[in-house]
């Protein structure tokens, strides 16, 4: 199970094909937050793809804290 986002290796300005069971890590663009640069990270799990046109069901976790790569879901 993926619990930490990698530091690099992200695809920019390109589409990425998806398939059921895939886990994708996403990173926001760098924005200015107060006096520092800030990126946030998340992961998307492709749960299912059905129908025509195709519709994907996605489970996701986003860490809203600047530059924090931890992607473990919070306890409910």
Image: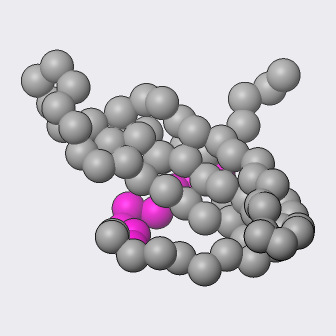
Picture coordinates of residue 17 (x, y %)? 60, 80
The image shows residue 20 at horizontal and vertical percentages of 82, 73
Q: How many marks?
A: 0
Name the quadrant containing residue 57.
bottom right
What is the quadrant of residue 75 in the picture?
A: top right
| Residue 1 in sight | no
Residue 15, can we see it? yes
Instruction: Specify whether 40 is left or right of 32.
Output: right
Q: Quadrant of the N terminus?
A: bottom right
- Looking at the image, the residue that sits furthest to the left is 35
Quadrant of residue 44 within the rendered picture:
bottom right
Identity of the residue drawn at 75% across and 77% down = 19
Q: Which residues are magenta?
A: 3-11
Q: Main secondary structure of the magenta part?
A: loop
Image coords of residue 66 (percent x, y): 36, 33
Q: From the viewer's perspective, is 54 left or right of 39? A: right
Would residue 37 be counted in the magenta stretch?
A: no
Residue at image coords 42%, 53%:
27
Residue 76 falls left or right of residue 12: right
Q: What residue sits 53% from the left and 76% below the top?
A: 16
Camera-nearest residue between 25 and 7: 25
Q: How is the image coloured?
A: one colour
Side of 10 relative to 3 (left or right): left
Residue 63 coordinates in the image, percent (x, y): 53, 36
| Residue drawn at point x = 39 percent, y = 69 percent | 10
The reply to whether the magenta stretch includes residue 7 is: yes
In the rendered view of the protein, which quadrant contains the C terminus? top right
Of residues 8 and 33, which is closer to you in this image?
A: 33
Q: In this view of the protein, which residue sits in the foreground, 48 or 54?
A: 54
Q: Check the image and report above or below for 49 versus 57.
A: below
């Amino acid at each position: 199970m993926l619990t930490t986002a990698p530091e690099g290796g992200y695809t920019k300005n390109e589409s990425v094909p998806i398939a059921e069971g895939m886990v994708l890590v996403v990173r926001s663009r760098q924005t200015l937050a107060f006096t520092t640069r800030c990126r946030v990270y998340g992961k998307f799990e492709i749960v299912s793809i059905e129908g025509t046109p195709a519709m994907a069901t996605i489970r996701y976790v986003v860490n809203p804290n600047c530059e924090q790569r931890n992607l473990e879901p919070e306890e409910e």
